[in-house]
């Protein structure tokens, strides 16, 4: 091979190396690390450490055994007394009443008894019992069934990106966009959001909330089905 051919091969190899390096650098700059993402999940509240008592002012036939399980629930920054009762079979505690008006009278209208997957309201805020054991109840901030045309759901967003980013928030009802906004979130910042939802008609609806960093294709979302009666 002559000198001219060797030089041409050298420059071709050099150019190829520069092209590969450029592609690697470009990908490393434009693509976030795998550990960077945004997390979206329902706001939940736990009821734990229930104690047995016989001294409860309860409306109706609340217990067959005469023993209540009483505790506290902190929901949306407010504290409520809660009892777990056995109204149908002695010693079987799968019904809950929550003293939402704080008058120390349980199981009044709208206060229960509620079972697993039942929906209840505190003012406009809708809640759904997603886990129910005798001494451990988990409540999520969204409904499964409602008579209310308007209600509020609660969810949590946490950013695992290494810098402050703008995120798009979208609320859909049956795939129709009902609310959108852009919010800046700092690295490792966790924010609780309360979103109003409106269902003017009777029927079954799918509600979806999605969040995505601006200018990217990534999307995190949560959704639920709610029956408007």
Image: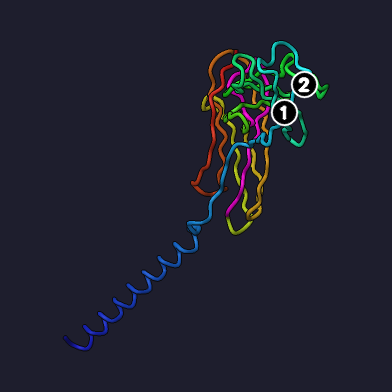
Q: Quadrant of residue 176?
A: top right
Would you say residue 116 is visible in this rendering? yes
Quarter containing the C terminus: top right
In x, y percent, where is residue 103?
83, 21
In x, y percent, where is residue 68?
70, 23
Residue, far right: 103
128, 18: nearer the viewer? 128
178, 83: nearer the viewer? 83
Range shown magenta: 140-160
In x, y percent, where is residue 55?
78, 22
Disc 2 + disc 1, Cβ < 8 Å: yes
SS for callout 1: strand
In reply to whether residue 152 is colored magenta, the answer given is yes
Residue at 62% x, 33% y: name it.
Answer: 136
Question: Is 193 placed above or below 151 here?
Answer: below
10, 70: nearer the viewer? 70
Question: Is 219 placed above or below 32 here?
Answer: above
68, 173: nearer the viewer? 68
SS for callout 2: loop
2 or 1: tag closer to the N-terminus: 2
Circle 1 sits on which residue? 70
Circle 2 sits on which residue? 56
Q: Quadrant of residue 191?
A: top right
């Amino acid at each position: 091979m002559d000198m001219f051919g060797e030089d041409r091969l050298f420059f071709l190899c050099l150019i190829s190396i520069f092209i590969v390096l450029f592609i690697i650098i470009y990908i490393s700059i434009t693509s976030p690390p795998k550990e960077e993402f945004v997390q979206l999940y329902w706001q939940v509240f736990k009821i734990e450490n229930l104690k047995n008592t016989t001294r409860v002012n309860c409306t109706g036939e609340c217990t067959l055994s005469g023993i209540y399980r009483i505790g506290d629930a902190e929901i949306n920054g407010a504290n409520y007394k809660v009892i777990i009762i056995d109204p149908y079979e002695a010693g079987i505690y799968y019904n809950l009443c929550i003293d939402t008006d704080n008058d120390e009278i349980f199981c009044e209208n709208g206060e229960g008894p509620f079972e697993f997957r039942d929906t209840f309201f505190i003012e406009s805020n809708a809640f759904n019992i997603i886990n129910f054991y005798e001494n451990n109840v988990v409540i999520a901030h969204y409904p499964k069934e409602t008579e209310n045309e308007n209600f509020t759901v609660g969810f949590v967003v946490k950013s695992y990106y290494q810098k402050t980013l703008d995120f798009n928030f979208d609320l859909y009802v049956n795939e129709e966009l009902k609310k959108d906004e852009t919010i800046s979130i700092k690295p490792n910042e966790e924010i609780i959001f309360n979103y109003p939802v409106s269902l003017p008609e009777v029927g079954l609806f799918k509600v979806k909330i999605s969040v995505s960093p601006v200018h990217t294709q990534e999307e995190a979302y949560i959704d639920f089905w709610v029956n408007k009666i």
